[in-house]
Image: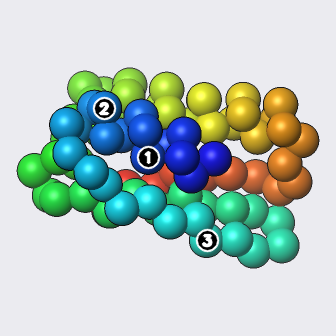
Amino acid sequence: MEKLVKYIIDQITGESSEVAIVKSETQSIIQVKLPQEKIGQVIGRGGRVIKAIRTLVGAKANKEKLPGSWRVEVH
């Protein structure tokens, strides 16, 4: 999952990003750290890009039958 999100965000921003997964019993959070000026590219107009990334993460989690809920956060 981490590789998927890193690949997508690196392709959008054109530079390497830092991606980490924080897990608890009921949910997993994928945290993406980017320079401030790149955050807008990842969020997109009206949040369209980040919503699409979240949809892909959810689909992959369902396909792989990963437990709990998954969230993507951009910092």
Q: Earlier in the sequence, mark 3 or mark 1?
A: 1
Q: Earlier in the sequence, mark 1 or mark 2?
A: 1
Instruction: Name the element at disc 3.
Output: strand
Q: Are marks 3 and 2 in contact (CB under 8 Å)?
A: no
Instruction: Name the element at disc 1.
Output: helix
Q: Earlier in the sequence, mark 3 or mark 2?
A: 2
Picture quadrant where residue 67 is located: bottom right
Q: Dot 1 corresponds to which residue?
A: 6
Q: Position of residue 74 (x, y in %)?
A: 37, 55
Callout 2 environment at 10 Å: few (<14), some (14 to 19), or many (20+)? few
Using residue 51 as the reference point, say whether residue 65 is left or right of it. Answer: right
Q: Residue furthest left?
A: 37
Q: Dot 2 corresponds to which residue?
A: 11
Q: Nearer the viewer, residue 26 or 59?
A: 59
Residue at image location 27% in from the left, 51% down from the top: 16
CA–CA distance between discs 3 and 1? 15 Å
CA–CA distance between discs 3 and 2? 23 Å
Q: Are marks 3 and 1 in contact (CB under 8 Å)?
A: no
Three-letter amino acid code of the residue under disc 2: Gln
Three-letter amino acid code of the residue under disc 3: Val
Residue at image location 31% in from the left, 54% down from the top: 17
Is 39 placed above or below 9 here?
below
Q: Position of residue 60 (x, y in %)?
A: 72, 34
Is 55 placed above or below 35 here?
above
Instruction: Name the element at disc 2.
Output: helix
Three-letter amino acid code of the residue under disc 1: Lys
Residue at image location 82% in from the left, 66% down from the top: 26
- In front of the other: label 3 or label 1? 1
**Whether residue 17 is visible:** yes
Q: Position of residue 1 (x, y in %)?
A: 63, 47
Callout 1 environment at 10 Å: few (<14), some (14 to 19), or many (20+)? some
Q: Dot 3 corresponds to which residue?
A: 22
